[in-house]
Amino acid sequence: MDPLDLAKRLIAAPSVTPATGGVFAELEAMLVPLGFAVHRFTRGDGPEGSDEAPVENLFALRSGPAGSRHFAFAGHLDVVPPGEGWVSDPFTPEVRGELLHGRGAVDMKGAIAAMVAAVAEVPADAGTISFIITGDEEGPALHGTRALIDYMGAEGIEPDLCLVGEPTSVARLGDMVKIGRRGSVNIFIDVEGTQGHVAYPHLADNPLPKLVAILAELDALTLDTGTRWFQPSNLEITDINVGNRAHNVIPALAQARISIRFNDLHTGHSLSERVMAIAEKHGGRARPVISGEPFLTEPGDFSRLVAAAVEAETGIAPELSTTGGTSDARFLRAVCPVIEFGLCNATMHKRDEAVAIPDLAALARIYTRIATQALGLDKGQ
């Protein structure tokens, strides 16, 4: 199977998050001839545009001999909105030179195409292979991979190892493999006051100085200096909102939002409590939303296997890293050891997103090596 043709088929099926329908039908049509039993289901029953909007998910399984190992590929078919100004239609795949252009070429329909092409080269009797594919990674991630994990649990399905096809490479295909991710928490801060005329401040209560004090104390924090595998945690102020259009009115409410990306020295709960205490000290309230906890797949047999497969095809010894944002690996790590490896990320989420066609072919070969060798590991590893 040609990963270029497969990628074109997936790109041509528009799937702005939350994705449903046609793109999953395309993937199902690719997998069934390879011996996979495909289960598609939808979660979420809210209106379009809400966090509860319907999301489609796909779990595909090709069972190997009894007692054989189970290797899982995981990823997402939803994409971010394309925006304006593309040279060609973002959902009409177009080859220009050695590049395939289209929304999702890199993140991450190209990688899923490479996974399909890869398993076509893995003998069915080598072991069990599955695909864990969601339509809600780029969105709220409420009814996507978490729902797939619930389904797998109910069915008694538990992979031994999982590889997520996020675009981890930086300058060249193969230069970086992710063995963990930092956690993420967004915290919304409200400070209430009493509206009034600026000329009569004694009749009002200005919430802004209190908010400024909260943010100043938070901005001055040094959360840590990093660990062996993780960079230092960072707290960033991402929004300040008063909504006061009048120059002579003291506002009644001031709001802010912060985002913390944190390493394994912390938990989302511990950081949330710390921020809540600072907010309360200055008369405010903080509401945390924890997106994910940090995780690390300790370097060992799995990471060595992935690194060896990458080096065999590219000549590059990849860096093992935990940098970058979050991914659905934060959920899958509760099921089994998980590593992320995929295409170069330079154009993901950008206008005229594109993947190098030779990289698609190389990634498929790497994935074939990884799956074949992972299925051959002893059960205890």
Image: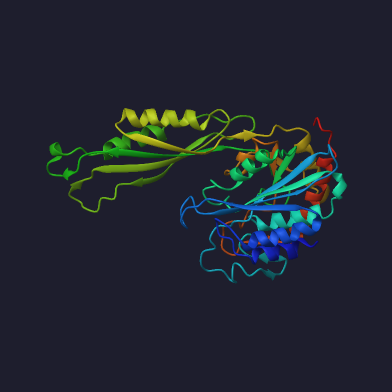
| Rendering coords of residue 37 (x, y %) | 75, 52
Report the residue at 51% width, 64% height from top. Answer: 83
Q: Nearer the viewer, residue 165 or 227?
A: 165
Q: Nearer the viewer, residue 356 or 78?
A: 78
Report the residue at 73% width, 39% height from top. Answer: 159
Q: Give the total number of marks visible in the rendering.
A: 0
| Rendering coords of residue 69 (x, y %) | 81, 39
The quarter holding residue 377 reads top right
Q: Nearer the viewer, residue 245 or 162?
A: 162
| Rendering coords of residue 65 (x, y %) | 86, 42
Q: Quadrant of the C terminus?
A: top right
Name the colour scheme: rainbow
Question: Can the viewer see residue 219?
Answer: yes
| Rendering coords of residue 223 (x, y %) | 49, 30
Question: Can the viewer see residue 327?
Answer: no
On the rendered structure, is 336 left or right of 284? Answer: right
Q: Quadrant of the N terminus?
A: bottom right
On the rendered structure, is 332 left or right of 361? Answer: left
Asked if 48 appears above or below 333 in the picture, the reply is below
The quarter holding residue 152 reads top right
The quarter holding residue 96 reads bottom right
Asked if 299 appears above or below 318 in the picture, the reply is above
On the rendered structure, is 45 left or right of 98? Answer: left
